[in-house]
Amino acid sequence: SETHLHLAGELLTPLPEGALWWAAERVLVVSDLHFEKGSAFAARGQLLPPYDTAATLSLVERLCALLKPKTVISLGDSFHDRAAELRLPEDYARRIQALTSAHDWVWV
C-alpha cells in the first residue's frame, strides 16, 4: 500500500526511490543527486566504484518514464562539487540534457 502525505490540502506520495510525487500537478521532486560524487572521492585517493552517477541517472530516468512528470524539481546537492561538470562523462551530460529538455526542470 502507498503512503500519502497531506500538505496544504494537497496529496503527495513519497516514493521508495527517495523521491516525492505530486500527482495532481504532475511534479516529481528529487534531491541530493550528488552527480560525480564517486569521481570526487577517487580524485582524493578514496577508490569507490565509479557507478554512482550512472545509477542515479538511471533511477531518475525510470521515474520520469513511469510517472511522466510535467515538472521535475531538483532540491539541492545535484552535483557533488563545483568541478563535477568537468568530470562528467559526455554520455552522462547528454542524459542530463535529455532529462532537462523533456520536462520543466527546476534546479534549486
Image (cartoon, rainbow, N blue to C red):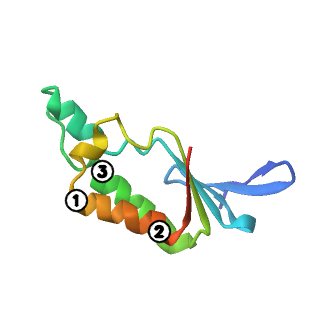
Depth check, front residue: 43 or 86:
86
- Which residue lies under the disc numbered 2? 101
- Which residue lies under the disc numbered 1? 90
Q: CA distance from mark 1 to mark 3?
A: 12 Å
Q: Quadrant of the N terminus?
A: bottom right
Q: Judging from the image, what secondary structure is the residue with disc 1 in?
A: helix
Q: Judging from the image, what secondary structure is the residue with disc 3 in?
A: helix
Give residue 29's position: percent from left, percent from top.
59, 53
| 54 sits left or right of 59 in the view | left
Q: Is residue 29 above or below residue 43?
A: below
Depth check, front residue: 63 or 90:
90
| 74 sits left or right of 62 in the view | right
Q: Judging from the image, what secondary structure is the residue with disc 2 in?
A: helix
Can you see residue 36? no
Can you see residue 24? yes
Q: Is residue 48 above or below residue 21?
A: above
Give residue 45's position: percent from left, percent from top.
12, 27
Q: CA distance from mark 2 to mark 1?
A: 16 Å
Q: Quadrant of the C terminus?
A: top right
Give residue 27's position: percent from left, percent from top.
64, 61
Q: CA distance from mark 3 to mark 2?
A: 19 Å
